[in-house]
Amino acid sequence: MDTSRTRTPQSIWETALGELQVQVSKPNYRTWFSTTTGLSFQDSRFTVGVPNTFAAEYLDRNQRSLIESALIGVVGKAVSVIFHVTGKSNGNGSHSGNGNGSADISLPHIDPVFTKLNPHYSFENFVEGPNNRLARAASQSVAQNPGHSYNPLFIYGGAGLGKTHLLHAIGQAAAANHINVICTSAEQFTNEFISALREKTTEEFRNKYRSIGMLLIDDIHFLSGKGQTEESFFHTFNELHNTNRQIVMTSDCPPRSMPLLEDRLRSRFEWGLIVDVQPPDYETRLAILKNKAQRRDVSIGPDVIEFIARESHTNVRVLEGLLNRVIAYAKLLRMVPTLDIAAQALEDVATKEYLAEEITPSSIIEAVAESFQISIDTIIGRKRDKDTSLARRMAMYLIRQETNCSLAQIGREIGNRDAASVTSACKLISADITSNPFIKRKIKDVQRQLSPQDTRQNN
Ligand code: ADP
Ligand code: MG
């Protein structure tokens, strides 16, 4: 029966939302779907109303096929979806920041807390690419509309991909709007808390954090498993969040992958928006290098830039290092940085990479162990906690992908397991790769580590 004739677009959409709610994570649903509406349904085109262009772009890029299948399930025929920005957020509270009904508390005027923000880490200096577009847009959104767009904002990703840069950029934009910002690392926060305990100044510590307008915490994964500091951070978080003060955190992994984090903190980290930064593709690496060379005011040919961009893999910090090395080398020789000079400057870096060893089961196990920060013995051993099991499955999957080993051989390499366990591990990981971005990234990270000169990072 074609129910779509008799139902309003909104009621079709509500049924589809019911379906989507079970398919995406809770925070994801709350952030992206709960504020949408069904606007119209004509000629198999279904229009979904979204509160802003940011949401439209996100849904269009990341959830289109999921949404379309949900709609097809409801109306029983092919549907293509269109997102229309309505500027309204489905009655779920004001996001406009004008205090309309939200618990805006006028902040006590206090002297700005001294935080070191790196002036180079600004939005202008941050080169956008497909790998960081969403994280950048979300960062700008919270900087412009702190406490009202996405709170908390949680940015995660691998090393040297610009997380700290974005955090400081938010801080600078907010400070320019006279918001009292604290930008600190979870490690500093912990040290400060411990010394407050020792010196019995926890009250001051609390007051300091309670009085600010925005809290930026770098590398929050450091808190994981640090009971008392977690507790203190939990209270700080609640006090700030309850009064709409913006919180932004960075981490090397998403909250769900922080095994030692208390659940009540984990769930709070998932309240707002979680975005990741990925390694830059070749084009973005080129753009970043051009930008850095320009700012350093050195003239360096496009061929040299391309050479460096090809050289380095995933980490922007390393990429910058290579550029600096070429510039320094040329300066030393009092020559302009030509392709030859660049090749010489990077020679030993390059040979190290190009002579990358052959990929073997043990090199894979080693790389996985390193990526999970556990020992090789643990991977091939009998422990069965969540992290170890995941690492073990990933090692099996990667050996299957990267070598010609048979299932039985793989089983032997991974602590004498049988072929059936290898098969099931490979199946699980293959399924996870499509549904779990964290696992997809982890796999890519290890693959890159195994063969840094590989071109697969370009896609
Ligand atoms: P992370 O905190 O993710 O480890 P950082 O923010 O410290 O990484 O970035 C490492 C270096 O790379 C910094 O110098 C930063 O300015 C630079 N960088 C990273 N991403 C970009 C980008 N998209 N555009 C310009 N510079 C970048
Ligand atoms: Mg950092």
Image (tube, rainbow, N blue to C red):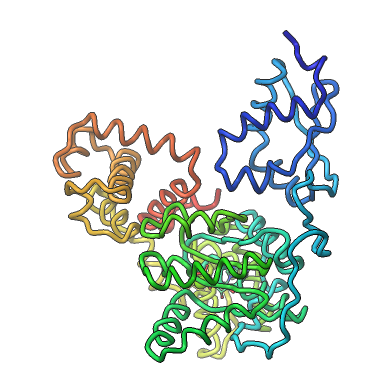
**Which quadrant holds the N terminus?**
top right
**Residue 296 position (above or below residue 127):** below
Residue 11 falls in image quadrant:
top right
**Residue 132 position (above or below residue 173):** above
Where residue 353 appears, x then y in whole percent? Answer: 38, 63
Residue 163 falls in image quadrant:
bottom right
| Residue plotted at (43% across, 55% down) | 263
Where residue 197 appears, x then y in whole percent? Answer: 40, 84
| Outermost top residue | 1
371 vs 178, nearest the viewer: 178
308 vs 270, nearest the viewer: 270
| Residue plotted at (65% across, 27% down) | 70
Give the left or right position of residue 48, taking residue 456 as reference: right
Residue 282 falls in image quadrant:
bottom right
296 vs 112, nearest the viewer: 112
Give the left or right position of residue 217, taking residue 29 as reference: left
**Residue 436 position (above or below residue 363):** above
Where residue 122 appears, x then y in whole percent? Answer: 68, 75
For ligand 1, the image quadrant comes to bottom right
